[in-house]
Image (tube, rainbow, N blue to C red):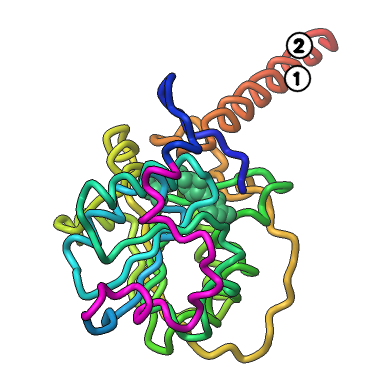
Amino acid sequence: MLGMHARVPKHFVLEERLERYADAIEIAPAALAGRWREACAPIGSAPFARLAVDLGCGKGPFLVATARSDPQTLFIGIDGEPVCIAYAAQRVIEGGLDNALLVPALGNDLVRIFAPGEIDELIINFPTPFPRKKDAPKRLVSLERLLEYRTVLAPDGRVVFKTDHEPLFAFAREQFELAGYEADYISDDYRSDFPDTPASEYEERLVAQGAKVHAIIAHVGELAEEPVLMEPPSLVDYLPENLEDLGYVPYGMRGTVVNLINRREHEAARRARSKRNRS
Ligand SMILES: C[S@@+](CC[C@H](N)C(=O)[O-])C[C@H]1O[C@@H](n2cnc3c(N)ncnc32)[C@H](O)[C@@H]1O
């Protein structure tokens, strides 16, 4: 698991929660690879028409709202943080949904959990940006991950990626292109174009703080040759030159931006001092 620490109330006992909502949690997902739509259909019902994955689903409000609006599609919420799985499973059970399930897993497990071509829609909402270079391999929109997703997406399947994070968005656009995806939609203001689709928990929170929703919707295109995997850069490389102009500082990068501004101010002050001392 990710070892991230979602906030929990004082008397929250993870094991007890996971057990209570176990009916909505699949702990042996690889056994269902290739037959999710049939295996998860309610007894006596036809297989689900489609399979959608909400990767990094968090505590699940988006998963539940989307599943409720589309009962023919099976929605699998995946998250590496067990606390999120427990909360999302609770929402599924309490919402009485039979077309949504949770899987505790990581982005790089998709190729193990799903058969080739099995996913119709892969949704990645506001993924953890992992701005530092050393954490870059954990980004859900790295070239390596996007190449893996190609194999589990249906031929007419698509990836829907949304973020408040301009540096991550700029990085992701490059990675989608390198991985041979073709964009059907790219926008810096998804919410204006799709005002009626459900918002995720992070979208609600960050838009209230002034964020715009940047989005890519892309399908798998031709890949002329296998791209060479290179070490992904720090997202600091995608920040604008003048940080003071940054109206909205993206989630997960506030500390970095403050440190960069302080560092630049100290350097400017030091240069000014040494100039004064020389004259
Ligand atoms: C910023 S939250 C966004 C949650 C939700 N998608 C939303 O928009 O409200 C990112 C979520 O992704 C999960 N996550 C981060 N990296 C992951 C990975 N490699 N595999 C699976 N989940 C991951 C985190 O545990 C967290 O719940």
Q: Label 2, on which residue?
A: 273
Residue type (three-letter) at the residue carrying disc 2: Arg
As displayed, is residue 106 above or below residue 48? above
Please say whether residue 128 is visible from this viewpoint.
no
Residue in the foreground of this view, choosing between 198 and 165 = 198
Residue in the foreground of this view, choosing between 128 and 115 = 115
Residue shown at the point (29%, 40%) measured from the top left: 207
As displayed, is residue 225 above or below residue 82? below
Residue shown at the point (27%, 58%) measured from the top left: 190
Give the side of residue 95 with respect to residue 2, left or right.
left
Q: Position of residue 150 (x, y in %)?
A: 53, 80
**1 and 2 marks in contact (CB < 8 Å):** yes
Circle 1: element type: helix
Was residue 231 drawn as part of the magenta stretch in this picture?
A: no
Name which quarter of the figure residue 75 lies in: bottom left
Label 2 C-beta lies within 8 Å of the nearest ligand 1 atom: no
Q: Label 1, on which residue?
A: 271
For label 2, the crowd category at 10 Å Cα-Cα, with few meaning under 14, some 14 to 19 and many 20 or more, is few
Give the side of residue 272 with respect to residue 247, left or right.
right
For label 1, the crowd category at 10 Å Cα-Cα, with few meaning under 14, some 14 to 19 and many 20 or more, is few
As displayed, is residue 228 above or below residue 236? below
Q: Position of residue 45 (x, y in %)?
A: 21, 80
Question: Which numbered marker is on residue 88?
Answer: none
Residue shown at the point (55%, 59%) measured from the top left: 140
Circle 2: element type: helix
Q: CA distance from mark 1 to mark 2?
A: 5 Å
The stretch in magenta equals 18-44
Q: Position of residue 9 (x, y in %)?
A: 41, 23
Name the image quarter holding the C terminus.
top right
Please say whether residue 51 is visible from this viewpoint.
yes
Residue type (three-letter) at the residue carrying disc 1: Arg
Residue in the foreground of this view, choosing between 148 and 142 = 148
